[in-house]
Image: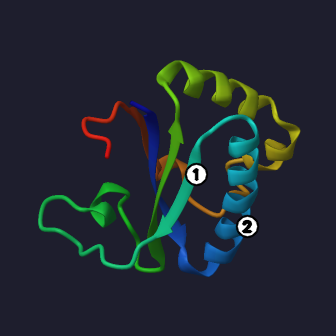
Amino acid sequence: MNYVDGFVVPVQKKKVGAYRSMAKLSAKVWLQHGALAFYESVADDVPYGKRTSFPRSVKLKPDETVVFSYIVYKSRAQRDAVNAKVMKDPRLAGMMNLKTLPFDAKRMIWGGFKPLVQA
């Protein structure tokens, strides 16, 4: 089975275009370093739940939307190797400044996952 990194981030609605540009470059870099697939998805049907929800998870503000992303790898070991290369890639240097990102990285949720079912 593969391995998956998942992310949920709040993005200001007016910065979705900038986020898309950043995501396109990121996808290129991750795939060139060995990731199997790279997905970025913007909220379309994510109601604000009474207790839990995607909007609640990132403390969504009225002028923001939720972006759900995931990257697929062959294995955890391969993911670790890919990410080590990605973090050294000079094309992503501009994304390391938290103040210039088109999303609030402090409210980003992320983690690595072992699939339970793969079809």
**Residue visible at 31% across and 78% down?**
45
User: In this figure, what is the number of numbered marks?
Assistant: 2
**Residue visible at 76% across and 41% down?**
32
The residue most toward the right is: 90
Between marks 2 and 1 in the image, the one whose residue lies nearer the viewer? 1
Q: Is residue 37 above or below residue 3?
A: below
Residue topped by disc 2: 21
- Give the amino acid type for the residue marked by disc 1 in the picture: Phe
The residue most toward the left is: 50
For residue 22, the mark is none
Q: Position of residue 21 (x, y in %)?
A: 73, 67
**Residue visible at 65% across and 64% down?**
102
Q: Position of residue 61 (x, y in %)?
A: 41, 72
Q: Position of residue 99 (x, y in %)?
A: 70, 54
Q: Which element is circle 1 on?
A: strand
Structural crowding at the residue carrying mark 1, measured as other residues with C-alpha within 10 Å and reported as few (<14), some (14–19) or many (≥20): some
Residue topped by disc 1: 38
- Give the amino acid type for the residue marked by disc 2 in the picture: Ser
Q: Which element is circle 2 on?
A: helix
Front residue of 55 and 113: 113
Q: Is residue 107 above or below residue 83?
A: below
Front residue of 100 and 115: 115
Quarter of the view holding residue 101 = bottom right
